[in-house]
Image (cartoon, rainbow, N blue to C red):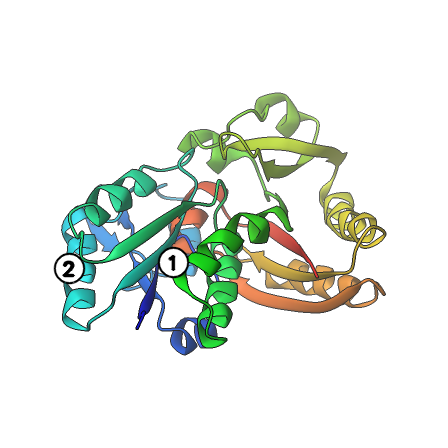
Amino acid sequence: MEKIALITDSACDIDNETVIKYNIRILPFKIIYSDREYTDKIDITPEEIYDNMINEIPKSSLPAIEDIEAVYNSLVEEKYTHVIAVVISSGLSGTYNAFKLVSEQFPDIRSYVYDTKSTSVCEGIILKKCGECITAGKSFDEIVSCIPSMKNNMHFQFVFGTLEYAKKGGRIGRISGTIGEFLDIKPIVGFDEEYGQCFTYAKVRGRNKSLKKLVEIGKERTEMKNCDAYIVHGNSLEDATKVYESLKMLPGIKNVYLIGQISAIVGVYSGPGTIGVCYVEN
């Protein structure tokens, strides 16, 4: 009989209820300051990172190989037969390769490591759907075969409060930062399907118009198909709530979930003021 474990990294954003319900194992990134190293989602919060950004923008490192090995060893002890790992884009981190490397060291557990070519709530939604499939009694092969279509039904866009942190962190991809900041251009950002790197989905001028654009994208999406919407934010609950209230008014949006803070590791590069919305086709 199959016993399937779900694993991810700490860039994943989803509600704690889902994490507990489906026993999702989360491998933490490291948040590195000049005088100290922290473990993401364990001894540092996104709020603490944002509050300290005026003094220092930290660096980060991917989950340690020994930590991934420790999780796999625990799964062996718990008699798991299969692993589904859903991880941050390989275009942003070496986490995918690290998970693949470790999984190959445990031939008695059959593993599938999925590169989301995205991050944050996209990881979380896929894991939630995988958990639902496990509960429904679907097999490992059935679930794995469905994951690409799960991802194809997801559309994740976000806007930064400022491009400053993405530029300094080197994760800005194909987004022009300096001129945009000068003109108060707020690019709506997405992830390309080929490389999983950031690109400019649309451009608007000013904060209010950028938030309205996120809602307009939802309206356009629901003209084709009904959707659920998942919202994350970087220390910007007030603006996230405005987007939430606007999306609830759209007839094609069936459910709206205000997930909360973007994980600390994503917050290092996105900075305060980030608002992201993932539309998931029903």
Give the position of the N terminus as an image quadrant: bottom left
Q: Position of residue 245 (x, y in %)?
A: 76, 67
Tell me which amino acid carries mark 1.
Glu
| Residue in view at x 52 percent, y 64 percent | 129
Q: Position of residue 96 (x, y in %)?
A: 33, 42
| Above-or-below relation of 149 to 143 | above
Q: Position of residue 114 (x, y in %)?
A: 41, 47
In depth, the one of 227 and 31 nearer the eye is: 227
| Above-or-below relation of 178 to 20 | above
The earlier-in-sequence mark between 1 and 2 is 1
Residue at the limit of the structure toward the front, as seen here: 1
Element on which disc 2 rests = helix
| Residue in view at x 31 percent, y 37 percent | 94
Provide the residue designation for mark 1: 48
Provide the residue designation for mark 2: 70
Label 1 environment density (alpha carbons within 10 Å; few <14, some 14–19, many ≥20): few
| Left or right of 223 on screen, residue 36 | left
Element on which disc 1 rests = helix
| Left or right of 114 on screen, residue 274 | right
Q: Nearer the viewer, mark 1 or mark 2?
A: 2
In depth, the one of 70 and 33 nearer the eye is: 70
Q: CA distance from mark 1 to mark 2?
A: 28 Å
